[in-house]
Amino acid sequence: MNLADALGFDHIASARLGTVFSELTRLGLKTGGVEVEAALETRDNRPGLALRFAYKEKTAAPPGAARFFNAFNAVEAYGAPTILSAFKHLPQYDLRPSPAFIEAQRAMLARPSREELLHDLRGKNEMLQGLSAKLAKYLSPQVYSSIFSGDKDVTLSTERKKLTVFFSDIVSFTQTTDDMQPEDLTWLLNTYLTEMSGIALAYGATVDKFIGDAMLMFFGDPQTLGVEQDARACLGMALAMQRRMAELETQWLAKGIQNPLRMRIGINTGYCNVGNFGSTERMDYTIIGGEVNLAARLEASADPGGILMSYETYALVQDMVAAEEREPLQVKGIRRSVRPFAVTSILGGDQDRGRYLKAERDGLNLVVDTAKMTGEARLGAIAELTRLVEELRLLP
């Protein structure tokens, strides 16, 4: 048997290197005047081929055979030299492995190392994390988490749930900002939406959408604390938003917005259809139904800077706020007459009651945060207010 037959190029032409090792072991590699025993060994956690030579009595070793096998012995699964490089030591045999065998060895040895694979994996993982973070900007955190955790399927499906719906907008926003430059208007709107959505997320709201300066949010899906707690969280959020609006008025006044922005809020609790609406190519996770329309109608009927809610909501939060019943509303899609209640004051259950002191007149917009004015700070505020009063008296 010659060396080419022993290596069995024909029937291992497309084999991987491990198969070649196994084949060499099975054949025993008897060639020329030399007997070779081949065995797989592992050194430093890397596989290699160990060879042992036994020369027949009175027979010289074929020229180049030892060099060939020594070179072959150096071959490792993920290292060099390759099997093909060993053949340069046996030019007299004119061994020509098949093209398929050569290509198989090159493909195997071109495989990336473990370190390269880990580096590539880390790179792809970082890319996916970056894409995930960008995608999260377009979804409410609760919806994003429920989708990526597998709790929600990305299919056209809805369910009926009792939710507390929040709707708000800025009174006369278009007229107030009509003379503003596009850059200033963009800054104002983004500041407003950023501030309000931050409060919404802190209270656990699902932010449905922004429609210009209007906001639609809801409580009760995909996460809920129960109908009553959802309603209380929604009202707490609305109160926090109105307080923050009072604080922002000073900043906006410094930006040249002479007319203070006033936010109207409508809140309603009732059964809605919630889920994925749209097409298989483009869908939107949102809510629809008459109860959603009612929240929008309550918002439109609310006082500037006020909160108007349905009786269904007020019944769940009446220990939090005092409210005044308004004239009944007739809303399209709802057969019953709607009893709206306007928030007039915060009851003792709210920890921020009495924190803010306000004064509003033509040309005057004053908000005092008493929680930030203790000791010397409060005395300093009194001194500043006294100075302003004296200057006001001296005006012609």
Image (cartoon, grey):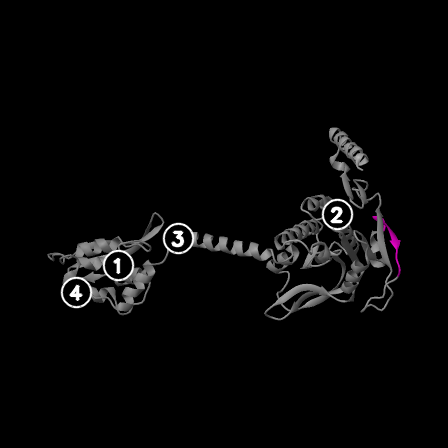
Residue 260 locus on image (x, y percent)? 74, 49
Residue 346 locus on image (x, y percent)? 83, 46
Q: Label 4: few (<14), some or many (≥20) within 10 Å?
A: few
> Which sits earlier in the primary sequence, circle 1 or circle 4?
1
**Extent of the magenta region:** 318-327
Q: Which residue is mark 2?
A: 240
Instruction: Choose mark 1 or mark 3, whichever is in front.
Output: 3
Q: Which mark is residue 83?
A: 1
Location of residue 149 with respect to 255 vertically, above or below: below
Answer yes or no: is residue 268 visible.
no
Residue 319 is one of the magenta-drawn residues: yes
Q: Quadrant of residue 2?
A: bottom left
Left or right? Give the position of 81 relative to 291: left
The amino acid type of the residue labelled 3 equals: Glu
Secondary structure under tag 1 reads helix
Instruction: Choose mark 2 or mark 3, whichever is in front.
Output: 2
> Which sits earlier in the primary sequence, circle 4 or circle 2?
4
Q: Which residue is mark 4?
A: 94
Secondary structure under tag 2 reads helix
Left or right? Give the position of 338 relative to 252: right
Q: CA distance from mark 1 to mark 4?
A: 15 Å
Secondary structure under tag 4 reads loop
Instruction: Choose mark 4 or mark 3, whichever is in front.
Output: 3
Q: Which residue is mark 3?
A: 116
